[in-house]
Image: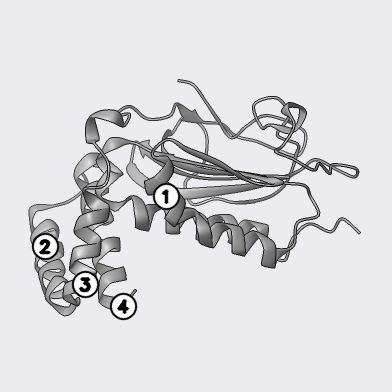
Amino acid sequence: MSDAARKYEENMARLLIGRRLGTLSEEREDSLLEGMDDLWWAMSPEEQQQFEERAARFDAGSIAESPFGVDVEVSPQTSVMPRRAA
Amino acid sequence: MYISAQRVASSSPPMTGVNAFLFEHGSGTMWAGPPPGDFMPENNPGRLVRELIEIRPAGNEVHSYLDIVSPDAISRDHLEYILRTVPEQVPNIGLPMSFVTVPVLVRFNLVGYLLPVWYSELNRLRDAALAVFGPGLDVY
């Protein structure tokens, strides 16, 4: 994977997470999208195709929209998983 | 041994990050096939020996996770090798993904909004899992 492809996916993740949390300002989102556009055209046609295939690989309807519960503080004295159902 | 790397999101302030935890089961935890139920994290995660925290736990939403269950004595090279094969397994198995490369169990899942970036999310969790594993457990 080229540097451009890796950064494109990382920025896409930032964009999706920022939108989900509502932490992206309009200017920041515009800046991210602009940078992603440059990265997209720096990727090879094969990398572009790979990304599109991976992104379309799963049917969104089959994936949970709700978080997997909440995280839990753990310590050497406890023996519990670091997450539990909400 | 149990490693969990999970993306969590706090609501106040709205932030996200990946926390990773390394648990050990202790001496004598060896098995030949898939991990026995006695060593599955839901029943017995083991004792926490290391953690890497980006977002202070508790009560944050969990948006993705990568779980690894293995005998304590697994080497760093072996773990890296197994985790390198995970991305190619995901499209075959689907999500939530759970597969065994004897004697190791790997599980991965994420919430729908991260679906377009499942590949980079998996790599992010894998890097956190390897970071918390470090050179491995001192089992000898």
Kindly identify the amino acid type of the residue bearing the numbered disc 4.
Asp
Q: Secondary structure at mark 3?
A: helix
Under mark 1, the amino acid is Gly
| Three-letter code for the amino acid on which mark 3 is drawn | Glu
Which badge, 4 or 2, comes first in the chain's sequence? Answer: 4
Same chain assignment for discs 4 and 1: no
Mark 3, residue position: A46
Residue B26 point in image, percent of width and height? 85, 43
> Quick one: quadrant of the C terminus of chain B?
bottom right
Q: Are marks 3 and 1 in contact (CB under 8 Å)?
A: no
Tag 1 subunit: B
Q: Chain of mark 3?
A: A
Residue B64 falls in image quadrant? top left
1 vs 2, front mark = 2
Dot 2, how many residues are within 10 Å of its Cα: few (below 14), some (14-19), or many (20+)?
Answer: some
- Label 4 belongs to which residue? A3
The x, y position of residue B4, in whole percent, is 58, 44
Label 3 to label 1: alpha-carbon separation: 31 Å
What residue is disc 1 on? B17
Q: CA distance from mark 1 to mark 2?
A: 21 Å
Residue type (three-letter) at the residue carrying disc 2: Leu
Query: Does residue A79 show up?
Result: yes
* Disc 2: which residue: A33
Marks 4/2 in contact by CB < 8 Å: the verdict is no
- Residue at figure coordinates x 49%, y 21% from the top left: A85
Side of A46 where A77 appears, left or right: right
**A72 to B52, vertically: above or below:** above
Looking at the rendered structure, whether the residues under marks 2 and 3 are on a common chain is answered as yes
CA gap between label 4 and label 2 equals: 17 Å
Residue B137, image x, y percentages: 78, 57
Q: CA distance from mark 4 to mark 1?
A: 22 Å
Cα distance, mark 3 to mark 4? Answer: 14 Å
